[in-house]
Every structure is written in structure tokens, then in C-alpha cells.
Amino acid sequence: MKETGLHGKVVIVTGASAGIGRATALRFAEEGAKVAAWDVNDKASGELIREIETAGGEASFHAVNVADATAVQDAVAQVIGNWHRIDVLVNNAGITRDSQLVKWKDGAVAATMTDEQWDAVINVNLKGVFQCTRAVVPVMIRQAGGVILSASSVVGLYSNFGQTNYAATKFGVIGMTKTWARELGRYKIRVNAVAPGFIATEMVRAMPEKVIESMVSHTPLGRMGEPSDIANTYVWLASDQAAFVSGAVISVDGGIVLGT
């Protein structure tokens, strides 16, 4: 099998403390990468560093709110200070604040999506991806190459009820990905997005059983995805095996489009 070429590469993973982000950090570590784990939550940072090192990688942790441009720039400087380069950025951090645009009941407006719900999701899921990528790209240009990977979603392809804000960000990530692939290819920087379906993260497992059963019933493969399914896709896209893949959106969803 062709080598991935990721041993010794420097990889930033945002939203790395749990779920897909944690699985992704550990999967890159298994390839021998140097993993800079970023997350707004630093409570389990020591444990995460130990897990990354046990998996075979070098590790650092940075408490970063990706919606804060200064915090992002400072964290990039720290990564450069530690390891002198950045080879891969995985824009994984994301949040939800679900609500109908307008909930109508008994002939009147019962509720709306608030400005706070809109702004919170836009700031993390869209602006955060923009800010992290903007901060890292000059480093990659100077070193003549790199890989940018971002989390979209099946919601970014097909929308979803009650997720105006989330869908806007995930559609937006796809637009930015395709634009950046055009702009940055000349510098040997590849840019791709991954669109996960229903993934068995801690957040999803906490949902009511009926909701989970509905998710599975709409997935032709008959199960939810595991965080490792997404992590493996990120690793492949970052690897030498995907050297001619750029501007792509890879759906990892168990065929859910066919089942809806």
C-alpha cells in the first residue's frame, strides 16, 4: 500500500477535544504526525495530549476560540514556534443552535430564530473557518504547499428543517472550499471539504431513541457513522494518496441521500 506521507507532518485540528475532532487528532497521530489540538474547552487537554502521544504522534494543545481572530493568530504563532511549519489544517470546530426561522401557531408568531442563535453559529462555523484558514495560508505559501480540510455536512448539501443558521454555514464552507481551491492551487495547496451524515458523537447519542432510530432508518447502510469514519476520510484527503484531489466535497453519510 502506498504510504500516506503524513509522518512528521504538522497538523492543526480545531474542535479537537471530543467527537470527530478527537478521533481525527488521534488518527493523524497514528500516522506519526505532530498534532496541534485546538479547542475552546481545555478541561481535558492533558488527557488528550497523552492519548495523542500514545497513538504515536507528538502533541500540543491550544485553548482557541476560532471566532476570535487574535486568538487564532496567536495559536498559529505558537504552532510555528513549536514545529516551524503547518502542513494540514482541519477546520472541524462547529456548533448548533437550532430553531425554525418563524414558528407559527394559532395564527400568530410563536417564536423566531434569534439574532443570538444566528450569530453564534455563523461566528464559529463560518467565520471561524475563514479566520483559521486565512491565518494558516501564508505559512503554507511560504513553505510551498499544504492541505486545508473543512467540515461541511449533508445539511450543507440538502438543508434541514430548523437549521437555517447551520445550513447557511455548511453551504458557505462548500463555497469557500471551491473558491480557495481555485485561488491556492498555484501554491501547491489543496483544499477539500467533508460532508458527514449522522455520526454517533456524544451529542447525537444523547438524543431521544426515536430520533436516532429515524436517522438510521434514513441511512441505507443501516447505521450511524462513527467518528473514525470521518477521521479516516480526513487522513486520506491529507495524504499523498489524494495528491490530485482539490476542490472536492466528499460525502461520508452511508448513502443517506438515497434513503431520503
Image (cartoon, rainbow, N blue to C red):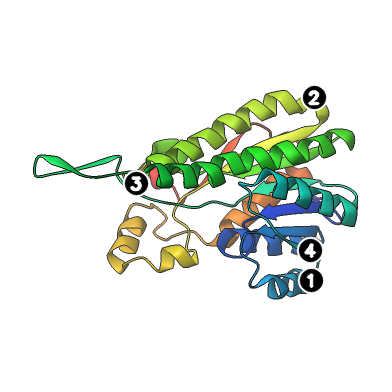
Q: Name the residue under label 1.
A: 53
Residue 197 in the image: state x and y as whole percent.
46, 50
Q: Earlier in the sequence, mark 2 or mark 3?
A: 2
Is disc 4 placed on a helix, strand or loop? strand
What residue sits 30% from the left and 39% below the top? 101
Cα–Cα span, label 2 and label 4: 31 Å
Residue 178 in the image: state x and y as whole percent.
61, 28
Is disc 3 placed on a helix, strand or loop? helix
**Callout 3 touching callout 1 (CB < 8 Å):** no
User: What amino acid is found at the position of numbered circle 2 in the picture?
Assistant: Arg
User: What amino acid is found at the position of numbered circle 3 in the picture?
Assistant: Gly
Give the tally of numbered discs.
4
Q: Which mark is residue 217?
A: none
Residue 51 in the image: state x and y as whole percent.
72, 73
Q: Name the residue under label 3.
A: 259
Q: Earlier in the sequence, mark 1 or mark 2?
A: 1
